[in-house]
Image (cartoon, rainbow, N blue to C red):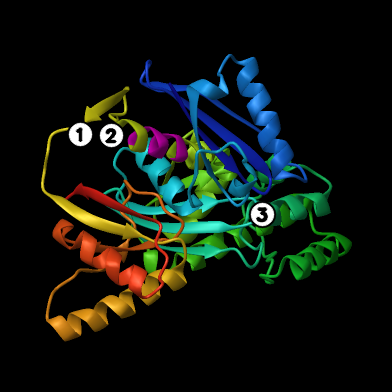
Amino acid sequence: MYYIGIDIGSTASKVAVYDDKKNDFVELFMIPTGWSGVEASSQILKMLEEKNIKKEDSYFVGTGYGRVAIEYADKTITEITCHAKGANFLFSNLDGTLIDIGGQDTKIISIKNGKVDNFIMNDKCSAGTGRFIELMANSLGCSISTLLEEAQKCESTDVVISSMCTVFAETEVIGLKASGKEKKEIAYAIVNSVANKVSSLCGKFKDDTYFLTGGLCMFDYLVKALEKALGGKVITDKRGQYAGAIGAAIIGFEKKSNNKVINNTKNNIVENNEHNKEKRLIITFNTTTDVMRAEKTFKNVMAQTNEVLGNIISIPSEISAGCGMCWESEVVFEEKLINILKENDIEYDNCYKIEK
């Protein structure tokens, strides 16, 4: 069977196809998202069929900002969960800070023992994103790759892009061009602006080593600029731009087969999880509002009964859900907790029993 992750991004739609018979990814490809995620997802399905990957033989997991556009998806999962899972695969049991520079947002994800510990997203402003570099490259009349090549030619300059706003930054670039500054100097300032923005986003996630994914991870000069701004090592992978799709495919495989995909850096192996271990109960929710209501309600019950019914935690990496938080408890409390939610008209997504 094929387990297919589809990441519908603002700029590009990425696809990762995992074949459980070959125990490996057999296809990684992308197409422009264009103006419609629905059309992009339809085109992807046609391309898969042309590769003899049939819909009836596949399990689809959608992610990315346009995941709801994938009408044939068996499941949709948030990009934070999928990028963390994909990065954990690419970088072999990741423990550190993941930076994903997307088309219209930048995600900083703190991962501990392969699981999401915390995250922050720059999704309200395009500064520090791929879109920012694309617009600045357009202002210079060149491509992103040419902009980075020009920047690399500049050894030093006093040119600085001071504005964090894309519109004002573009105005600065126009002004610098008019003042006679060289293209390589302006390009250098643009790249530094992006690196500094990403560094400021990392904030409390400062680390010695960082892991980079997203469409810009293929550019060595940007990696070096980030290392300079962050003051740490930046590690990437040639498949980094597919991290979200890879993670989605892996989650689909693990949920359907009760097996776990492990990357041992040489080849992929599958670990069977059928042996019984002590379990813990995880209740997931579709929205942050629901999980907050649930926490308040459970705490009120605990105060009245003196029972310890659990606590709120970040979603474990082996689970996917629409909200980044969940309720953790003992398995024996499952029926009681579900009844409490129903009595208080609180919607929940699902219940899972996973290994401690």
Magenta-highlighted stretch: main secondary structure?
helix
> Label 1, label 3: how many angstroms apart (C-alpha)?
50 Å
Classify 201 as above or below 59: below
Q: Residue furthest bottom?
A: 304
Is there CB contact under 8 Å for labels 2 and 3? Answer: no
- 269 lies left or right of 136: left
Highlighted magenta segment, given as a residue range: 248-254
Q: Which of 136/44 is in front?
A: 44
- 219 lies left or right of 348: right
Classify 208 as above or below 49: below
Label 2 sits on residue? 258
In the rendered structure, which amino acid carries the disc numbered 3? Tyr
Q: Which of 162/334 is in front?
A: 334
The answer to if 50 sits in the magenta stretch is no
Label 1 sits on residue? 273
Classify 221 as above or below 186: above
- 108 lies left or right of 169: left
Q: Which mark is residue 96?
A: none
> Between tags 2 and 3, which lies in front?
2
Q: Which of 112/176 is in front?
A: 112
Q: Quadrant of the N terminus?
A: top left
Query: At which x and y percent is residue 86?
Result: 42, 41
- 343 lies left or right of 3: left
Q: Residue at x 66, y 45 (%)?
A: 148
